[in-house]
Image: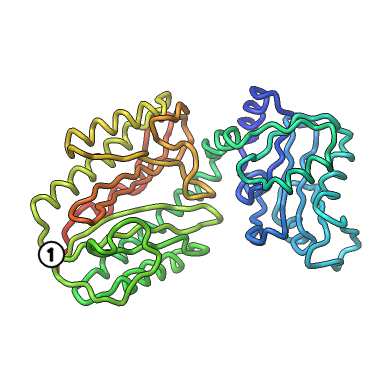
Amino acid sequence: MLMNHSRAQRLMAEQGLDALFLRNALNVTYASDFHNAGASLPTRPFAAVVFRDVAVEPFLVVPSVDFRLAKHMSWIQDVRAYVRAEKASDRDREFYPDFFAAVRAGFQDRKAPGLRLGYEETVLPAPFFDQLQAALPGCTWVPASDLIGRIRAVKTPEEIVNLKRAAEITVKAHDSFRQAIAVGATERDLALAAQFTMLREGAEKVGFIYVGSNATRGFAHHPFPTEVPLKRGDFVKVDMGCVYRGYESDFVRSYVLGKATDRQQEVYRALDEGSLAIGMYLKPGRSCIDVYNWGFTFMNERLPGYAREFLGHGIGLGPHEEPRLHEGNAMVLEPGMVICIEHSFYLDGARYHFEDTFVIEESGPVCWTAALGRCLEVAV
């Protein structure tokens, strides 16, 4: 089971919530274990409702076309399907006419009027929310996006297993990328090498691979690798991640083909040292603000003019989750959090970029990506 139920119940109690009404696709997956591939279609909404009181059974609302799969995958027994794509299935089951009827029936069957419902105010469009409120008269709707982020920030043992495997796959994919770097190779060649390894090693899919070279392309997240051959002295960077059992990875390194300048080495060394130092500062009980301030000071002592809005982010079913390491986030670090330390520095138009993944254990942080790709120069 993915969801940390005891944590969810405790945080709901602190906020005075009776239940969480989850509509965001990743939150539905988190609450139900149902990986809803069709959630990318806005005309096929999903929802999971979990109650603070463990005696009240949760329920899941899905489009009829996904009814069988939801019943197969989810730990939630009560799956309510509404007509969308399919009007009937091979099971003797009557579907609700629409999403809102299915939601209303789920609450009516629990005889639970007048509840305080936490909802994701950042993802519900106004017309949809208006219909939802009309379907559940008497309920009080409480914005809870931050609360849901806090629940998901601490991973269950199953989540940590999945995240660690995703990181291991990406480390191997990056090794393939690194070995493919050569004079005459193209950005596309390097991306393909990494993609093939991700899939061969067991990833369900490639999450993303952003390759950029030189000052004209070597910045953040360029989506289209080119066929332009690399040459001696070129700069190249890659930001990559895979998806394993729905869980993501995120990893960045930067390189120079051949001999790097003293300044390039200086910048890279500072980023490398900073990535590990900030990661090892991720101790239980410290706040995100503490880590950001400490890391920002550490980096400016080595790279005057260093400027970053954040120094890292949580990772899970999504690539950027809580805890986010910035100066406005008072969230306190806890064991079970998985965090990517991420930072960069611009030099001659190119973005020297570094990212490593850490898990916080009771005894302190452990780096999952420490052993690979810690040298700027690629021999050519």
**Horizontal and vertical percent position of residue 6:** 64, 30
The residue where tag 1 is placed is 258
Neighbour tally class for label 1: few under 14, some 14-19, many 20 plus, Cα within 10 Å: some
In the visual, does 131 lie left or right of 154? right
Determine whether the residue tagged by mark 1 lies in a helix, strand or loop: loop
Q: Nearer the viewer, residue 94 or 305?
A: 305
* Residue displayed at 50% across by 64% down: 205
Residue 193 x, y percent position in the rendering = 35, 71
Point out residue 328 in the picture as x, y percentages from the top left corner: 43, 30
Number of numbered tags placed on the structure image: 1
Q: Work out whether 347 lies above or below 367.
A: below
Quadrant of the image occupied by residue 229: bottom left
On-image quarter of the N terminus: top right
Query: From the viewer's perspective, is residue 327 above or below residue 48?
Result: above
Q: Is residue 240 above or below residue 297?
A: below
- Seen at 63% across and 60% down, the residue is 40
Residue reaching furthest to the front: 127
At x 72% / y 59%, what residue is drawn?
44
* Residue that extends furthest to the left in the rendered view of this protein: 262
Residue under the image location 29 percent in, 33 percent down: 295
Q: Amino acid at mark 1?
A: Gly
Q: Could you say where residue 179 lies in the image, as x and y percent from the top left?
A: 26, 67
Display colour scheme: rainbow
Q: Is residue 278 above or below residue 158?
A: above
Give the side of residue 155 with respect to residue 142, left or right: left
Instruction: Looking at the picture, tell me which residue is in the foreground, 27 or 123.
Output: 123
Picture quarter with the C terminus: bottom left
